[in-house]
Amino acid sequence: MTAQQSKQYPATNEERKKREAEALRANLARRKQQQRSRKAVEQDADANDQGSGSDKD
């Protein structure tokens, strides 16, 4: 490896770390949103089940 190539690697690694960190943050945000959506759907389903108990005759 030449001296110039070795100088390029730290910058490349830093850029890679930045991209990976950004991707991880985006994934975490997406998972949290999905979890919130699932909770909302479950709560709506529970509310509908409790409210429609007399309609099931």
Image (cartoon, grey):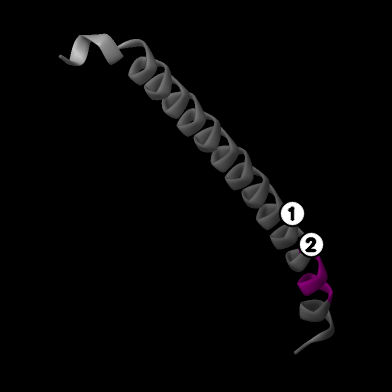
Q: Which residue lies most toward the left here? A: 57
Between the residue at mark 1 and the residue at mark 2, the CA separation in whole angstroms equals 6 Å
- Contact (CB < 8 A) between labels 1 and 2? yes
Mark sitting on residue 18: 1
Q: Which residue lies most toward the bottom here? A: 1
Mark sitting on residue 47: none
Which of the 4 quarters of the picture holds residue 45?
top left
Mark sitting on residue 14: 2
Q: How many marks?
A: 2
User: Which SS type dominates the magenta stretch?
Assistant: helix
Residue 23 position in % (x across, y down): 62, 50
Which of the 4 quarters of the picture holds residue 53?
top left
Whether residue 54 is situated above or below residue 6 in the rendered picture: above
Q: Nearer the viewer, residue 54 or 28?
A: 54
Q: Nearer the viewer, residue 14 or 29?
A: 29
**Circle 2: residue type:** Glu
Q: Nearer the viewer, residue 23 or 5?
A: 23
Name the image quarter holding the N terminus: bottom right
Residue 19 position in % (x across, y down): 67, 53
Residue 42 position in % (x across, y down): 43, 29
**Circle 1: residue type:** Lys
Residue 34 position in % (x across, y down): 50, 36
Instruction: Tell me what residue is drawn at x 77 percent, y 73 percent.
Output: 9
Q: Secondary structure at mark 1?
A: helix
42 magenta-colored: no
* 10 Å crowding of disc 1: few (<14), some (14-19), many (20+): few
Magenta-highlighted residues: 7-11
Which of the 4 quarters of the picture holds residue 55?
top left
Instruction: Tell me what residue is drawn at x 78 percent, y 71 percent.
Output: 8
Whether residue 24 is situated above or below residue 49 in the rendered picture: below
Instruction: Tell me what residue is drawn at x 38 percent, y 17 percent.
Output: 50
Q: Nearer the viewer, residue 16 or 36?
A: 36
